[in-house]
Amino acid sequence: MAELSKQSRRGILIILSSPSGAGKSTLAKRLMAWDPSIQFSVSATTRKPREGEEHGREYYFHTREEFQEMVENDEMLEHAEVFGNFYGSPKKKVVEALDAGHDVLFDIDWQGGQQIRNSMQGDDVVSVFVLPPSIAELERRLRGRNQDSDEIIEGRMSRSRDEISHWAEYDFVLVNEDVDQAEAEVKAIVMAERLRRSRQTGLNDLVRGLNAEFEAMK
């Protein structure tokens, strides 16, 4: 009997972007809790580790010299400088995951998303931009973290206007007014994209098998 294996598809690159404080990191965590098979793309950075952070878990921590060497060797899928530090996505593990049929999740800004969409892996991308319900709510969330100084928060708020201006570059846009509703919307996007005909690499074999069954019934 013809059967389509669950592994008979190419993985997708799920890009979540938003201004800082709009909720993309929370949605990323919920998405991976919903489906643990989704692999999170751990970014490389030149910033110093914060208390409790470990190399290879939250980030791959590198010197500026190491990071620049990785860029020169084409080892980064995307990279950008943010608030004086470099951030980027190492390429090798992402490509291996895609080829094995695994989905990879990116929690990155519009610059990184743009670079990935323009890369050799662009056809694998599903991009989602998360908007806050209001700018006042965005600031409230940033201050509610109790992680950053007033100066850093002001910098993030200033940068958010530029980030929001790139919303139209994304495949999907959602407003994170209620995080449970936003989570449900992200899940629906992922499930639909997995079923896209172009991503299901085993469909041709399945249909040939179905036709063979018809022939056998004659």
Image (cartoon, grey):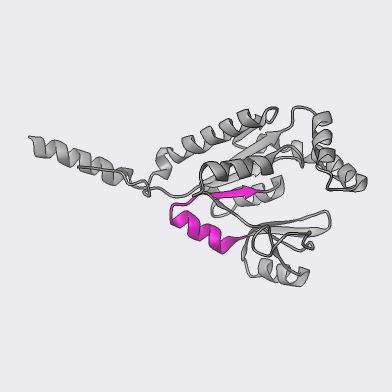
Q: Is residue 39 left or right of residue 156?
A: left
Nearer to us in this view, 19 or 74? 19
Q: In the rendering, at what x and y percent does residue 67 appear?
A: 72, 67
Seen at 68% across and 51% down, the residue is 112
Residue numbers of the magenta segment: 90-107
Q: Is residue 159 left or right of residue 25?
A: right
| Quarter-of-image position of residue 17 | top right
Seen at 19% across and 39% down, the residue is 211
> How many discs mark residues in the rendered view?
0
Quadrant of the frame with the C terminus? top left
Answer whether residue 199 is visible to the viewer in this image. Answer: yes
Q: In the rendering, at what x and y percent does residue 101 appear?
A: 44, 52
Seen at 76% across and 39% down, the residue is 21
Q: In the rendering, at what x and y percent does residue 10 appear?
A: 43, 50
Answer whether residue 126 is visible to the viewer in this image. Answer: no
- Magenta includes 96? yes
Q: In this view, does 125 lie above or below 100?
A: above
Nearer to us in this view, 135 or 143? 143
Q: Is residue 179 left or right of residue 12?
A: right
Residue at the extreme left of the image, as rendered: 218
Q: In the rendering, at what x and y percent does residue 69 appear?
A: 70, 71
Nearer to us in this view, 140 or 15? 140
Q: In this view, does 155 lie to the left or right of 211?
A: right
| Quarter-of-image position of residue 71 | bottom right
Quadrant of the frame with the N terminus? top left
Residue at the extreme front of the image, as rendered: 52
- Magenta includes 19? no
Q: Is residue 69 above or below residue 9?
A: below
